Image: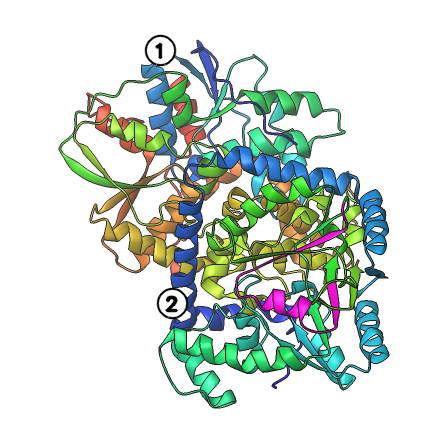
Amino acid sequence: MTQTPHHTDVREFHPRARAAIADPKIRKNFRKAMDGLITKRKDAFEGWDLEALRDLGANIRLRALANLPDLLEQLEKKLSENGVKVHWAIDGDEACRIIRDICVARNAKTVIKGKSMVTEEMELNHYLDDHDIEALESDLGEYIVQLAGETPSHIIMPAIHKNTGEISELMHEKTGTDLSSDVEYLTASARHQLREKFMNADVGVSGVNFAVAETGTLCLVENEGNGRMTTTVPQCHIAVTGIEKVVGKLEDVAPLLALLTRSATGQHITTYFNMISGPRKPEELDGPEEVHLVLVDNGRSSIYQDDELLDTLRCIRCGACMNHCPVYTRVGGHTYGTTYPGPIGKILMPHLIGLDEGRHLPTASSLCGACGEVCPVKIPIPDLLVRLRQESVDGDKLNPAKVRGHGAKRGTLEAMVWKGWSWMHARPGVYRLGTKVASRLRRLQPGNLGGWTRYRTAPKLAARTLHERMKERSQ
Amino acid sequence: MADPIKVYPPKPSHVYFYATCLVDMFYPDAGMAGIQLLEREGIRVIFPEDQTCCGQPAYTSGYHDEARAVARAQLDLFPEDWPIVVPSGSCGGMMRKHYPGLFRNTDQETKAAGIATRTWELTDFLLNVCHIKLEDLGEPTNVAMHTSCSARREMGIAEVGPRLIGQLNNVNLIEQVRAEECCGFGGTFAVRHPEISGAMVSEKVDTLTDTGAGTFVTTDCGCLMNIAGFAGKNQKPLSGQHILSFLWERTNPGKEDNS
């Protein structure tokens, strides 16, 4: 199995964006996929009071976050009572170590994985590989990107950047499957290949969509049945989740699930919805004999400290923000070089990797607001992007910066330009004189305005400003 | 910060006209058209001479101290309790939605919050406060419309432009594909990420051109500059106009110079 590459250097965003935009195949694959997802989502919410449902979703998440420490303790207690072993990991490395230790204790050599973004975040596959444990992705999209030696380009549809022809060629080359444009055939081939691995895997690793504190229940949303197989066939199941995924009660899950599946893929409900509350009981015929939950912090508790940034943790990982993002649609998920691409990645990754690494992320948005408009739990993504821009230039003495790597994007020239701009626009007389002089000298206006005029004509200054015209009018 | 509740006031005797710097320097005709449309509704328009810029460019770039210094210079321009009308969803959104947060925990907090509740995007104001009735005096024509993202999402007025144009009997508004998608302007975004912005405006020009209308109107000068600038540079058969200029030209009985 080809090993997944490490996430690429996020600082290379610009060159990768240029390359993606120049690649008609990427442009076409993403445009087609995103247009389809946008339509499906819209249809799926037809007849629903979407605003009311989003309010409900937002409130459930806000309530859970407000009580997060208590809910996590309650979750641990309930899960322990149910026979699930709970582990806490401060960062990705610790989470990887915990998972390896469980594998070693069981003398496990093969791990089958369900879809889990947090394990992408901590690069679990690399870690296990370095410790001679084979990890195989069982979600079809994840399986494809793993075959290709790539990272997921979308959090819900990891292989969305590839079309059927590319997938067929890949499977042919790596697994000997016949070349075919028949999706059914390709899916069946992958299923056949994976079934064998399921039967022989020592450990199953999965993510978690919602962890219910009240009952100690781990909920897993999926379409292919691989989640169910991952969590029931191997004798040991390790679930991994970020600490923010906890909700208070079972009744909180239904609205969130309704929002999640419709927002993500436009489905009213997914094919499978697993609720795991413990290992196999003595009288039961199947299921793992051992279940673990690894609760991963990895920077989340620092987000939690800030009243505004905290909203980032509401995310239920539906991917609707990327599906509707005009920037993501143009450049695709790999351009970001981050585990989470698109709008949610732009507000989440700076916390995970620091603003010094991810300093371009908050600027790569036109602030069009489409992400905030579709977010099922109403995360004010555009506001958070502005906040992170401010943090990246450390530009607000009233609200001193808090995010790691803050101020990394501040450049002397840029800061001076804004100071000069501010000085002029805070002085009405200077502004009027400046704009009047500019309009008189408009024929001397430079024709080359850098990035702007590469694609557009330079804007033409008017012969007389509105200020001048209104002044004449009043005389 | 919750959005200020949008309750339309009764039609006032006076309004403050806040032109925005792009209108002031590049599109003063759109500003004049807006003022004349208001005056035709019997409203006295006050143009505070000391207005400069709402501060948004620095604000969205993360330079909040610099933005606050500029915004602070605007706060004393509206002493009477009259509405403040802005011919831009973007600058209107800055004043309505972001001023309260920008001035939180400062001496200007109350004043900024007051201005936020009094700020209206001008087409919204004409339709929903003035209840304007437009009589179309122009020749039959087709037009496409691009509503800016800030007008659409921040100010929630995506329906206002089409409803105003809908009052014009001889104008056929042709809907573009993906009407809700951003044109790629985004202020400094267009310069910081020129290729992405260029790809976005390229597709926007295509969808607008595909309507066959030949002209488009928009609520914001930023989008106008971006879309018309791309069409111009690439010799696409598409011209643009601010919606206020369009409405004024279609309904102005005299053809006198509106300066």
Q: Vertically, is B11 above or below A401?
A: above
Compute the Cα span from label 2 to label 1.
52 Å
Q: For residue A92, which quarter of the picture? A: bottom right
Please tell me which residue lies in front, A261 or B173: A261
Q: Dot 2 lies on which element?
A: helix
Residue at the top extreme, as displayed: B13
Please tell me which residue lies in front, A85 or A136: A85
Q: Which mark is residue A340?
A: none
Quick one: quadrant of the C terminus of chain A?
top left
Q: Residue at x 25, y 21 (%)?
A: B134
Q: Which class describes the residues within 10 Å of circle 1: few (<14), some (14-19), or many (20+)?
A: some
Q: Nearer the viewer, mark 2 or mark 1?
A: 2
Q: Vertically, is B146 above or below A410?
A: above
Q: Which class describes the residues within 10 Å of circle 2: few (<14), some (14-19), or many (20+)?
A: some
Q: Vertically, is A261 above or below A184?
A: above
Label 1 belongs to which residue?
A: B42
Label 2 belongs to which residue?
A: A28
Where residue A318 appears, as percent x and y from the top left, is 57, 53
Please tell me which residue lies in front, A285 or A170: A285
Q: For residue A317, which quarter of the picture? A: bottom right
User: On the picture, is A400 further left or further right than A136?
Assistant: right
User: On the picture, is A306 further left or further right than A465?
Assistant: right
Please tell me which residue lies in front, B257 or A303: A303
Boundaries of the magenta span: A215-239
Amino acid type of the residue that numbered disc 2 sits on in the rendered structure: Lys
Amino acid type of the residue that numbered disc 1 sits on in the rendered structure: Gly
